[in-house]
Image (cartoon, rainbow, N blue to C red):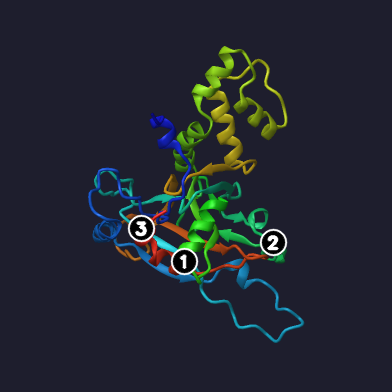
Amino acid sequence: MADPVADKDKFVPAFAMPVIAPPPASYASDAATYYGAVAGQCFLAFADVVIAPEDALPDDPNQPPAPPPDPKGLTITIPNPAGAMTDAAPFGTLFAVMGGWLSYQRAAPDGSAVDLMPILPLPFATVTPAPSYAAPSGLDATKPWGVFVLRLWGMDYDKLAAAVGKEAACNAVYYLGVDEASAKAALEPLVKLHFRQDAYDASIAKPEKPVFQDVVEEILGQAYSPVPSYATLVGDFLTALLNGATQLLVKGGASIGQAVQVPDSSVTTGTPPPVGRVELWFLDGSQPPRFISPYPFFKGAPGYDF
């Protein structure tokens, strides 16, 4: 008989919209109907944007002047970010579009911008001056925020590439505008899923050194003495992750945090209500990577069956 826990936790490819929760287990109809129901409740606003590092690349001296880059980034504004469908996450929640390695880059201490240099691939990491991403207008500078980079797991990328056919499949996704406190809360259960307490407890009972302890010690570059508790390891791993010192393997559709909230700029009287705001960039799997539009693989999402 199959182990139900193992079945539940099995890492299998899955596609999810970046700001719309996957259909809940209780949802009886198909994905297309579900997305239509969400659209009727949460009127997301989309704006195409030019990706700053791509725009800043110098012209190739051996080639004629290239045309300016096409808008490939996508800014999403989320009204009523605290709202949600029944049994679903709030509309401002961010989701892993597919399974992969998740890393985080925090904004500067004053909250003004995120230094993109450490998380950009070549040739974008060679741009001078070093590219950065400015805080969204109206963002509360006292709330830590940053950028997630999700680099797709090989099997997930292969599934997506096969599904989109001739179109370029994304191999990495940048989520620009992540509320850090919400990210920590969302990632804690994912860390516990990846490094299970029952495995830790079994090692302590033998006794032997827990694998989780080895992992965290390698990240921190120092040994624990005495043996740390499971809660300590979880907390230290989360701290290292949010400090940009490690990454976490997550499943497609996993909740990874909330979009930052800013005042609604369209409201000019009274106190503007908050809206969620996140900007998305997508890289393909070529060498060197190129930024691509997400629309081809978003349009096919209701039909994906991995």
How far from the left and from the top, in percent, is residue 42?
Answer: 28, 58
Residue 125, numbered label: 2
Q: Is residue 266 visible?
A: yes
Three-letter code for the amino acid on which mark 1 is drawn: Val
Three-letter code for the amino acid on which mark 2 is drawn: Ala
Residue furthest bottom in the image: 64
How far from the left and from the top, in percent, is residue 159?
Answer: 49, 57
Mark pair 1, 2: CA separation: 28 Å
Q: Which residue is mark 1?
A: 164
Q: Quadrant of the N terminus?
A: top left
Residue drawn at the location 38% of the way across and 61% of the way down: 301
Q: Is residue 265 above or below residue 225?
A: below
Q: Relative to the observer, which residue lies in front, 33 or 18?
A: 33
Q: Relative to the observer, which residue lies in front, 33 or 216?
A: 33
- How many numbered discs, if any? 3
Q: Relative to the observer, which residue lies in front, 136 or 201?
A: 201
Residue 261, numbered label: none
Residue furthest right in the image: 62
Residues packed near mark 2 inside 10 Å, few (<14), some (14 to 19) or many (20 plus): some
Q: Which residue is mark 3?
A: 78
Give the foreground label among 1 and 2: 1
Three-letter code for the amino acid on which mark 3 is drawn: Ile
Q: Earlier in the sequence, mark 3 or mark 1?
A: 3
Give the foreground label among 3 and 1: 1
How far from the left and from the top, in percent, is residue 169?
Answer: 52, 64
How far from the left and from the top, in percent, is residue 82?
Answer: 32, 48
